[in-house]
Image (tube, rainbow, N blue to C red):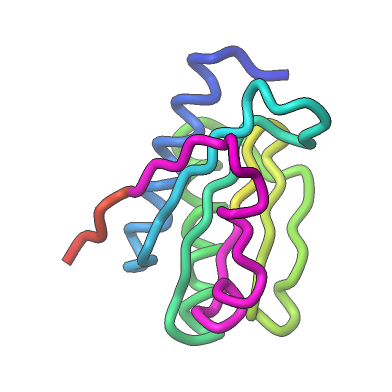
């Protein structure tokens, strides 16, 4: 379990890692206070191709490791790079291809979750 400050620092570094590889449509889903959730926050974004999805995941992994010496507990989906999930315990990062994101619509699974959009860097 991370402190609030550690979670905030992790979140900032995850977002910077996503933006470094031009990840788009970043949304933070705040799940704190929702009973039965496996984490406190989802960070959801998308890349335009499997190569970009992989590059975003690599960027997040390296950015977080270099800046705050934290490694993901697990990473899944790297084989086909349509949806990569990176588990940082209290924060889970989801990197999608646009059609996969549209199909699963994770940001809408919890009606009472607070959504925060992060503007794209262009």
The residue shown at (49%, 35%) is: 114
List x then y, in percent, for residue 29. 53, 42
**Residue drawn at (60%, 65%) of the image:** 105
In terms of depth relative to the viewer, which is nearer, 113 or 92? 113
For this view, does 25 lie left or right of residue 81? left
If the image is split into quadrants, where does the N terminus sit? top right
Position of 73 compared to 115: left or right? Answer: right
The answer to whether residue 40 is magenta is: no
Q: In which quadrant of the rendered view does residue 58 lie?
A: bottom right
Q: Is residue 96 above or below residue 34?
A: below
100 above or below 42? below
Q: Locate residue 119 relative to residue 42 in the image: left or right.
A: left
Q: Quadrant of the C terminus?
A: bottom left
Task: Give yes or no for residue 110 being in the magenta stretch.
Answer: yes
Residue drawn 48% across and 41% down? 66
Which residues lie in the magenta part?
Answer: 94-117
Residue furthest out toward the left:
122
The residue that appears at 57% across and 72% down in the rendered structure is 101
């Amino acid at each position: 379990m991370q402190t609030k400050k550690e979670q905030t620092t992790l979140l900032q570094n995850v977002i910077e890692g996503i933006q470094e590889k031009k990840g788009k449509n970043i949304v933070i889903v705040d799940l704190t206070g929702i009973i039965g959730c496996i984490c406190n926050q989802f960070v959801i974004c998308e890349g335009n191709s499997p190569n970009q999805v992989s590059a975003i995941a690599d960027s997040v992994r390296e950015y977080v490791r270099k800046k705050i010496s934290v490694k993901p507990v697990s990473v899944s989906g790297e084989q086909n790079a349509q949806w990569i999930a990176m588990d940082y315990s209290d924060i889970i990062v989801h990197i999608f291809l646009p059609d996969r994101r549209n199909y699963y619509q994770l940001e809408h699974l919890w009606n009472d979750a607070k959504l925060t959009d992060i503007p794209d860097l262009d």
